[in-house]
Amino acid sequence: MTHLLNLLIQGLNRKLSIKKHRLRAAIVGAGAIATGIGEKQYPMTHVKSYYALSDQIELFAFVEPYKERRRIAKSVFQDFKFYENIDDLLNSEKIDILSICTPDEFHEEVLNKAFDANIRGIWCEKPMALDFNEARKIADKARMSGAVIQVNFFRRFIPEIRKIKEDLIDRVFGDIKLINGFYADTYIHNGSHLIDLIQFFCDELKNIYAHLKESYLNDGSIFIYSKVSEDVPCILQPFTRNLYNIFELDIFCEKARIRICENGRRIEVYHVKQDNHFTHLKILNPEHETILCNWQDSFTSALSNLIDVVEGREGSTMSPPEQSLMSLLFIKEIKEMVFN
């Protein structure tokens, strides 16, 4: 009986210790990607991830400068503190991790203020900045300040996609021979996810040719021909979202074709087999292997990884600013080629 009581007391003490030492977090921007509130509906949000990891971290505050959006968010999150601007939050509260869910043009400003306030961990929606040179300054400042940044290219945090990367590194499918990708509409907002995923798999992406199909405000629908090495072509093709949304990546290897489809929710692997009819040829087996991805937990995996790095349990984030810079440099080169 005494032994059982001691175990119960130890368990209670552990729970109290965890609760006592929870990190504190705030979110800048109370729109759809942060809260799920808005015209766009997202199955993954920053709030859901903080709730999922509430034994490790306490989300307690929002910053939302727009009065109506702040009013709506307050009506939903009644137990949270709300601030009209980032300065009031940083001057009033101790924060360990800050989520940046503002419109893209404000990311740079909020990041710099977070550095000045010595925030330990920053979970930032992509991109870090709209300009490559400014993003490079941010990465340098993060390194000097010791701040840990997780850029939210969410497909990097899907375990099945990470396993494909491991298999590519181990040459399970042989050498990569061709990469073909499709994205919806704009190369910055949507194509950047595809660019980042290719660089996640291959580390290097060199622009060769880019052609503007349709221009949008500060963005464009662009056909891109590039290479991931000296002899592996990579073709990125835009498609109009007015018809339907698409995000697909085809990786053709010596022994298999890997198709990431349904916006990264499913992976199909077509292995090479002997053609039963033309026996001198090999074909891709139509009876492919299907891998369903655990994509709905990707945001929570991103936050968990960030917490582990901030707490010293892991060495680096899965989507660090240095790798995000590679995508921004590629985008900068495309922009100069097409618009200059």
Image (cartoon, rainbow, N blue to C red):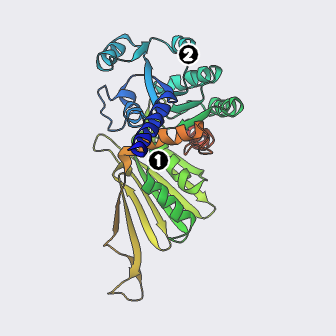
* Residue 209, disc: none
Q: Is residue 327 visible?
A: yes
Q: Is residue 202 left or right of residue 144?
A: left
Residue 314 location, quadrant: top right
Give percent across and percent down for residue 240.
34, 43
First-in-chain label (1 vs 2): 2
In front: 151, or 263?
A: 151
Q: Is residue 56 visible?
A: no
Q: Residue at x 51, y 14 (%)?
A: 89
Q: Residue at x 39, y 66 (%)?
A: 269
Label 1 CA crowd tier, 10 Å (few <14, some 14–19, many 20+): many
Q: Between label 1 and label 2, give the one nearer the viewer.
A: 2
Residue that lies at the very extreme toward the right in this rendered image: 144
Eyeballing the image, is 193 above or below 171?
A: above
Q: Is residue 202 left or right of residue 279?
A: right
Label 2 CA crowd tier, 10 Å (few <14, some 14–19, many 20+): some
Residue 291 location, quadrant: bottom left
Residue at label 2?
90
Residue at label 1?
157
Residue 68 location, quadrant: top left
Eyeballing the image, is 68 above or below 222?
A: above
Q: How many marks?
A: 2
The quarter of the rendered structure image containing the C terminus is top right
Q: Amino acid at mark 2?
A: Leu
Q: Amino acid at mark 1?
A: Phe
Give percent across and percent down for residue 63.
45, 17
Q: Residue at x 53, y 66 (%)?
A: 176
